[in-house]
Amino acid sequence: MTTTSQDLQLLKKQRVAAAALSHLRDGMILGVGTGSTVNAFIDQLGPWVGRLAGAVSSSDASTRRLQALGIPIVDLNDVDGLGLYIDGADEANERLELIKGGGAALTREKIVAACAERFICIVDESKLVKHLGAFPLPVEVIPMARRLVARELTRLGGRPVHRAGVVTDNGNHLLDVHDLVIEDALSLESRINQITGVVTVGLFAARPADLLLIGGDAAVRELVRPR
Ligand code: 5RP
């Protein structure tokens, strides 16, 4: 049987997901993100069933996976904050700023990240980039504002493409913005957030990760957010 590059990538995701387990503590309510790397993490949570008090989930898909394992789902409105949030990313730079939303869960992911004292981002090494933006930037929009927001994003130099057929867990649409040169992620995040009709932009610069775990061929590398 031959090993494909997809198999190798999955191994890296499983490796980095395993490394994140060492940050869990008994009795904690854990914030859980969305995507294939997070799925690899959830799939290794078996020994933590009964030890975690519960999980706040960032998507319906992660909720289903956590429930299937027997981990209680906690409503974010029933807690004052979270100690730890674990999630993946589509791109990460060395400042630990991220592009997220490839899995359409960016809004809830941003909400859970905002509540977390510590955000650990788990990625395979293909996600670490020098400059954010090769991955089209996801923007969740109120459906009736899609063309309005698209025009504004074009003015910012991007090429927005409607992610046809996808409706987010919040009932909204997504624009994936190509060709953006992202030099100042923090100010671009704030600028896009101010466009009427935008629900969330998938730039995580105001609330970047605190720790980036990067799964490689043989090991997991750690990058800590520069202060
Ligand atoms: C979902 C996300 C995911 O974290 C991101 O798309 C990475 O996913 P994967 O681990 O499958 O590569 O932001 O909205």
Image (spheres, helix red, strand yellow):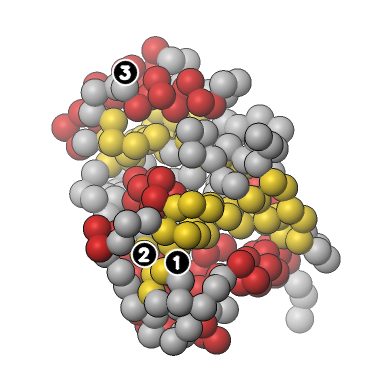
Q: Is residue 196 above or below residue 137?
A: above
Can residue 179 be seen here? no
Q: Is residue 169 above or below residue 66?
A: above
Residue extending farthest to the top is 155
Q: Position of residue 54 (x, y in %)?
A: 38, 74
Q: Position of residue 10 (x, y in %)?
A: 65, 67
Q: Amino acid at mark 2?
A: Val
Precedes in sequence: disc 2 or disc 3: 2
Precedes in sequence: disc 3 or disc 1: 1
Q: Amino acid at mark 3?
A: Arg
Task: Give the distance between the C-alpha atoms of the residues marked 2 and 1, in whole angstroms.
Answer: 6 Å
Which residue is at 44% across, 87% downward? Answer: 50
Q: Which residue in the protein does label 3 denote?
A: 151
Q: Position of residue 125 (x, y in %)?
A: 72, 52
Q: Position of residue 159 (x, y in %)?
A: 44, 24
Q: Secondary structure at mark 2?
A: strand
Which residue is at 65% across, 41% downward? Answer: 225
Instruction: Name the mark nearer the viewer: 2 or 3.
Output: 2
Q: Which residue in the protein does label 1 denote?
A: 30
Q: Residues within 10 Å of mark 2 (few under 14, many from 20)?
A: many
Q: Which mark is residue 56?
A: 2
Task: Give the distance between the C-alpha atoms of the residues marked 2 and 3, in whole angstroms.
Answer: 35 Å
Which residue is at 56% across, 63% downward? Answer: 37
Q: Secondary structure at mark 3?
A: helix
Precedes in sequence: disc 2 or disc 1: 1
Q: Amino acid at mark 1?
A: Leu
Can residue 141 be seen here? yes
Residue extending farthest to the right is 218
Instruction: Tell me if label 2 and label 1 are in contact, CB under 8 Å.
Output: yes
Q: Which mark is residue 112?
A: none
Q: Is residue 193 above or below residue 91?
A: above
